Amino acid sequence: MLKRAVMIVQQHLKDKGLYLGAVDGAAGPITEAAVTKGLTLRQGELPAGSLAFPAERRITLMLQLICKDKGIECKPIDGYWGPVTQFAYESILQLQNTGTLPDNWRDDEPSDANPHRWPRDTGNQAEMRSFFGPPGNPPIKRVPCPWSLKLAWDTRQKVTHIGCHAKVADSVEAVLDRVNAHYGAGEIKRLHLDLYGGCFFSRKKRGGSTWSTHAWAVALDWDPTRNQLKWGRDRASLDHKDYDFWWHSWEAQGWVSLGRSRNFDWMHVQAARL
């Protein structure tokens, strides 16, 4: 049983006057007795015979009831730790840490806007070649960044300009100016948006056989250490409500986040449709 989960149960029971021990995450006899008292008061919400369940399952039942009380979806209340209970547990952790529940991220769908008519990066990449030219040697234009950037892999190196394909340069500049005006230097640093992972790189896709959008210099990477290639929204830092304006700014220009669209490679945003 997760220590933090036990602590949540202990603190809840302590607040109810049912537990007098330490909030230490140790599920010993004193905790188990308090859990039994707590479940006894709510037997009408529990499956039959629940008071005779093994100790860990009874603690999970108590945690599920706590989540229910907080308005966190946790059905069925059965004492089994499955995906629903795991998500509920993560939600109550965020509530304790930040005072707010997670946003309903599935309700915030990526925008379909494509005002510059960026091509699709599909199949044999014929649209990419027709629109941007051949990969590997794009016409680079330097775009000034309105905040101080550092190379993500060597933060001692400062970056003042972003070199990208000339066709996307005005769009990149518009996004950066909008983001800077919204967040400001202090917030940008806190969100690690000052950690730049690069743009042009003549290579194939990692784990793929076609050219990376980086080979056309129409993709940018941000804070790669906290948003690694195979990480999903359960780990990537860029999947957080604090970054909503960031993503919406890119998407308004037709750029695509692989993280928001495919739930991997959250560092990456590209001027190419999927």
Image (spheres, rainbow, N blue to C red):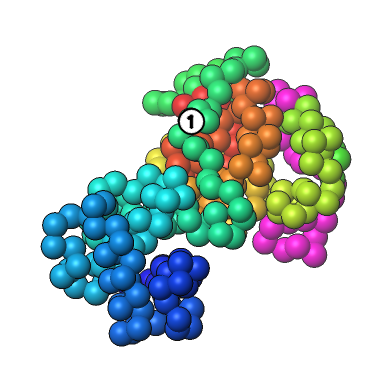
Q: Is residue 160 magenta?
A: yes
Closest to the observer, 268 or 235: 235
- Tell me where residue 48 sits by quadrant: bottom left
- Tell me where residue 183 sits by quadrant: top right
Q: Position of residue 23 (x, y in %)?
A: 48, 78
- Residue type (three-letter) at the residue carrying disc 1: Asp
**Is disc 1 surrounded by few (<14), some (14 to 19) or many (20+) residues within 10 Å?**
few
- From the image, tell me which residue sits under label 1: 107
Q: Position of residue 122 (x, y in %)?
A: 43, 26
- Count the marks: how many? 1
- Tell me where residue 172 sits by quadrant: top right
Closest to the observer, 54 or 44: 44
Q: Is residue 245 magenta?
A: no
Residue at image x 59%, y 37%? 269
Q: Position of residue 190 (x, y in %)?
A: 74, 55
Residue at image x 24%, y 52%? 44
Which segment did they paint magenta? 148-171
| Image: 52 above or below 202 | below
